[in-house]
Image: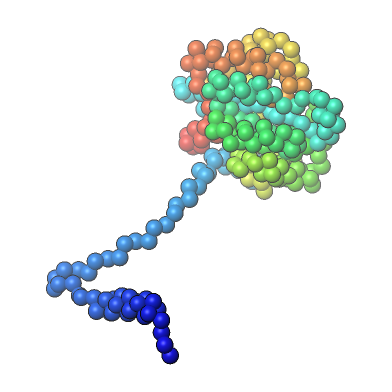
Amino acid sequence: MIVPARRLAVLGVLAAALTACGTAQAPPAGRPAARPAPARHTVVPTQPQPPTLAPGPAGLTPVFTHGPRTPDRTVALTFDADMTADQGARAARGEHFDNPALIATLRALKVPATVFMTGRWAEQYPAQARGIGRDPLFEVANHSYSHYAFTGDCYGLPTVSPDRMLADVERAYTAFREAGVEHAMPYFRFPGGCHDRRALEALSPAGVTAVQWDVISGDAFATDADAVARQVLDGVRPGSVVVMHCTRSAAPATERAVRTIVPELRRKGFRFVKVSELIRAATARH
């Protein structure tokens, strides 16, 4: 069999390399053999585990209302991005359930905030949901999928049956992921804030912390921005959670009120934080 010259050259190189490997000299006496370099591994950063409250008595979903009343004057502005499951037709006719000017103002003023979003809102405004979810200034939390009440007689809202409560919350998280919100927080706000023991039991498997508030802004359907601002400024204490809204149609004065609230609270020495920071401070004290 005739082997081409080029192939002979390659075989010669391989033979020399193998010979060198087989005849490598041992290290001198008393000197340890060199250790091979450790293999390099790519470390993928993980998302920090968000703080949550421990389950309540009998494993009930815990409820958070405000942070510690400490000299550290922190306050969390929260905004409910409401849209019920049956309001698609109204959106199609031009009703605005979003408020991009409000989000732009929060960014301009560099105000951290928590947005409690319904799954239906994320489906209607996926680009905005994704933008909020990916902005480190904000965090997205769950406000149900349908914005149906979890109790009877809750501001005239339709109700979700107890056997569908957990599925409604999980469906909202699915809507967030499909919109591109990758790290929604394990916090849930009941539509209208209405809840009872049955609702807290139903959501226990979800592992969420229910987040209420201690300051009502009064911005729902309000048109007087100054009145909204006064109500917030009069009510805020260290650790407060303020509830506001992120819907032009239902809260048209909110953005103007925020432009008054933020500088005035800063003048009083308050620092704006997300809900997660208040919960972390609360858990650290226990």
Q: Is residue 220 visible?
A: no
| Image: 159 above or below 255 | below
Task: Please name the residue shown 79% across and 33% down the image.
Answer: 84
Task: Please name the residue shown 60% across and 14% down the image.
Answer: 259
Return the residue found at the far left: 29
Return the residue found at the far bottom: 1
Image position, residue 186 (x, y; %): 61, 41
Image position, residue 284 (x, y; %): 47, 36
Task: Please name the residue shown 68% across and 11% down the image.
Answer: 225
The N terminus: image quadrant: bottom left
Image position, residue 115 (x, y; %): 64, 30
Image position, residue 219 (x, y; %): 70, 18
What colouring does the structure picture have? rainbow
Judged left or right of residue 283, residue 209 is right
- Who is closer to the viewer here, 251 or 124? 124
Judged left or right of residue 277, residue 166 is right
Judged left or right of residue 150, residue 261 is left
| Image: 112 above or below 52 | above
Judged left or right of residue 134, residue 173 is right
Residue 248: quarter of image: top right
- Who is closer to the viewer here, 26 or 211? 26
Q: Is residue 35 visible?
A: yes
Task: Please name the residue shown 37% across and 61% down the image.
Answer: 39
| Image: 228 above or below 66 | above
